[in-house]
Image: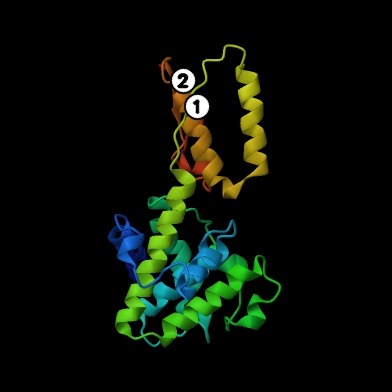
Amino acid sequence: MNVAERNQHGEYYVNVKIAAVSELTDGDFPNYPATHEAHRMMTDLIEVQSKGFRGVVITAIVGKEMNPNYDPLENFYACNPRSLFEGGIWNALRANNIPCGKSDPLNVAKNIQHLNEAWAQGRRPQSAALAAVHFLRLLRASGAKDHERLVNYFFYRLVRYSRSITDFGITVSDYAEVSRQMLANKLIAFATRFPESGTIPQLLIAKMLSAMFASSSTIVEGGEESVFGTNTTSKKTGGHLAEH
């Protein structure tokens, strides 16, 4: 399997996993109540602003799926994580609206071989780094059936968290004294205070502008485009307002 095929397989695997858990609920995972260690690990690992640690875990899971002999705890780089994540996994996460950065795993584990307490020491948040280590150890110690169940639970919690921060409704105020300048200032303040690599502010602001101009001839374009490409090279619209 060459690099391109390997990355494509990684992208396919993540897409399949996300699709498999997208309609599930907590009731489908009775083995992991709030008191279970796996539940606590997922909370510490996933429900945080830092995306790098869950990126490490996703990469480790995909690497293990491709090579059963791969041990991310002892040699994380053996799966060539940069290529695998940036060339495959990232595409699947973006396609499924999972908040992620282009180089999530490398942001927290660049040139790291061993994922352990020494690596987790000093990481921010340290609880997320430790959760990544402990969850990978739990996966390594699990039999085939439990391993698959834990992997599915990880993707389920990832999807659930993503929906919790992206599923929102927009209510347009009819308060006449709310000027466009005031709205612009608030959106600018939001984008600078909560950058999230640009992904969440871009999506939210695009939705708000679309709702605001819904009854006019102005069309908001570019909200779904990648925040990582430049307007010129990727030919994206860059949050364009067009009169039609």
Mark 1 residue type = Leu
Front in this rendered view, residue 145 or 196 = 145
Q: In this view, does 6 lie to the left or right of 44?
A: left
Labelled pair 1, 2 in contact (Cβ < 8 Å): yes
Front in this rendered view, residue 11 or 140 = 140
Give percent across and percent down for residue 203.
49, 39
Mark 2 residue type = Phe
**Which quarter of the figure has residue 146?**
bottom left
Give percent across and percent down for residue 219.
43, 23
**Which quarter of the figure has residue 168?**
top left
Above/below status of 206 relative to 182: below
What colour-coding does the image apply? rainbow
Residue identified by numbered label 1: 209
What is the CA distance from the residue labelled 1 to the residue labelled 2?
6 Å
Q: What element carries label 1?
A: helix
Above/below status of 229 relative to 52: above
Give percent across and percent down for residue 130.
59, 75
Q: Which residue is drawn at 49% across and 67% down?
A: 42
| Pointer 2 local density, CA inside 10 Å: few below 14, some 14–19, many at least 20 | some
Can residue 231 be seen here? The reply is no
Q: Which residue is drawn at 33% across and 76% down?
A: 148
Q: Which residue is drawn at 44% across and 60% down?
A: 158
In the rendered image, the residue lying farthest to the top is: 176
Front in this rendered view, residue 36 or 45 = 36
Q: In this view, does 182 lie to the left or right of 80?
A: right
Q: Residue at x 52, y 20 (%)?
A: 173
Above/below status of 148 relative to 216: below
Residue identified by numbered label 2: 213
Quarter of the image where the N terminus is located: bottom left
Give percent across and percent down for residue 184.
62, 26
In the picture, the disc for residue 43 is none
